[in-house]
Image (cartoon, helix red, strand yellow):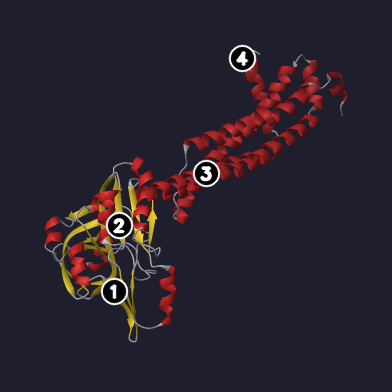
Amino acid sequence: MQRSQFISTVHLGVKSLLLHKLRSGLTMLGIIFGVCSVISMLAIGEGASYEAQEAIKKLGSTNIIIRSLKPPDEASDSGGGGNFELNYGLTYEDGARLQSTIPGVVRVLPMRIIRENVRFNVNLIPCQVIGTLPFYPGIVGVDIVKGRFLCDADEKHQQNVCAITTALASRLFPYQAPLDQAVKIAGVYYRVVGLVQELNTPDKRAQTEDPEGETLDNFVYIPISTSRSRFGETIFRGSFPNIEAESVELHEIRVKMASTEFVETAAPQIKNVLNRFHDQGDYEVIVPLQLLRQAEATKRIFNIVLGSIAAISLLVGGIGIMNIMLATVTERTREIGVRRALGAKKQDITTQFLVETVVLSVGGGLIGVLIGVLVPLMVTYLADMKTIVTWWSVAIAFSISGAIGILFGLYPATAAANLDPIDALRHE
């Protein structure tokens, strides 16, 4: 077919669609909603998956997290009343054993986490006091905003100094500069030496109390030696005569490995070492690398499910196009007979009807892409939910819409081209 003939055929096909604007528009709705749903659902799924994976990545793919847990049997016994002491959880010796026995260990970071109130003048804020070592920022991930973090001298001399998060500083010092101010924790004053911001605000820490309802970013960091001397290792809860004492040396240990290759083998080795000295199930091992891989696998399954559901809408849209085009062939039988009698070939008739279906599907696809990109933006704005529109979801959705126009338009176009010219001219 010559170029001029093809352009003429395309013009004729578009003109035929414009004669029935409402019907053409309604026919396109199936494709519009199909493409829109593919892009929107994948964008929402991609955004949710991204946030989950980023949270896991920030825990450190080369880190292994070990947390103290209150044994279930001990926890159930605690409701019976009376005075007693629970002794469980990780110890300083555990950290030393892991450092010396597990291959690939770069550093072992011990942490003591205590729920307390921090006071400055009349401001009293619940917080988590984290006793740790100076290399905490390099393992957990902390951005030093102002001042400094803890140093070796602070740890060695059990200094009453602290670094606090920017979130806590904004609540505790609404009108003052936090650096070098003295804050009071459990009757002891600590000098603020630095402002920090955790890159991964944890949603679950080893707790000495239920932190539900409290903000999770109110952290105070003090030297672990200071924590041991000021707070001790036994925490008392309740009131007389029902007083419960918990003795926990370390609430959390983070083990930084040399590379991700060591992480796979180190996790079971760590459990084997700890099981020799912990027979009451008073710890848990969390491997962010494994969580990340599980999240990636879940993401793939999630995308397949969402894509399949959305693809059904495209299929329904394609069936709608075929149905309308078959009805159009019946309506325009006489027109087809006239064109054939005037010399039009089967190829011309096929091209004309294919052009109409492709225009419907591609036009609907373009509108669907536009709406599909806008919907995730609205979801992000209204629901404060992260969404990510990927180029491949747009390309796949639009390509499928074009393919549907050809596949579902081929049969009506072939049926129109195969009409007998004489019978078509006799059609009423």
Task: Please state which amino acid type lies under the numbered disc 3.
Answer: Leu
Label 2 and label 4: CA atoms lie apart by 74 Å
* Residue at image mark 2: 253
The numbered dot on residue 88 is none
Mark 1 or mark 2, which has the lower sequence index? 1
Task: Please state which amino acid type lies under the numbered disc 1.
Answer: Ile
Label 1 and label 2: CA atoms lie apart by 19 Å
Dot 4, how many residues are within 10 Å of its Cα: few (below 14), some (14-19), or many (20+)? Answer: few
* Residue at image mark 3: 42
Mark 3 or mark 2, which has the lower sequence index? 3
The secondary element bearing badge 1 is classed as strand
* Label pair 3/4, CB-CB below 8 angstroms: no
* Label pair 1/4, CB-CB below 8 angstroms: no
Q: In percent of the image, x 14 and y 56: which residue is there?
A: 152
The numbered dot on residue 235 is 1
Q: In percent of the image, x 64 and y 29: which residue is there?
A: 358
Label 3 and label 2: CA atoms lie apart by 38 Å
The numbered dot on residue 3 is 4
Q: State left or right for residue 266 relative to residue 47.
A: left
Label 1 and label 4: CA atoms lie apart by 87 Å
Label 3 and label 4: CA atoms lie apart by 40 Å
The secondary element bearing badge 4 is classed as helix
Q: Quadrant of residue 418?
A: top right
Residue nearer the viewer, 200 or 104: 104
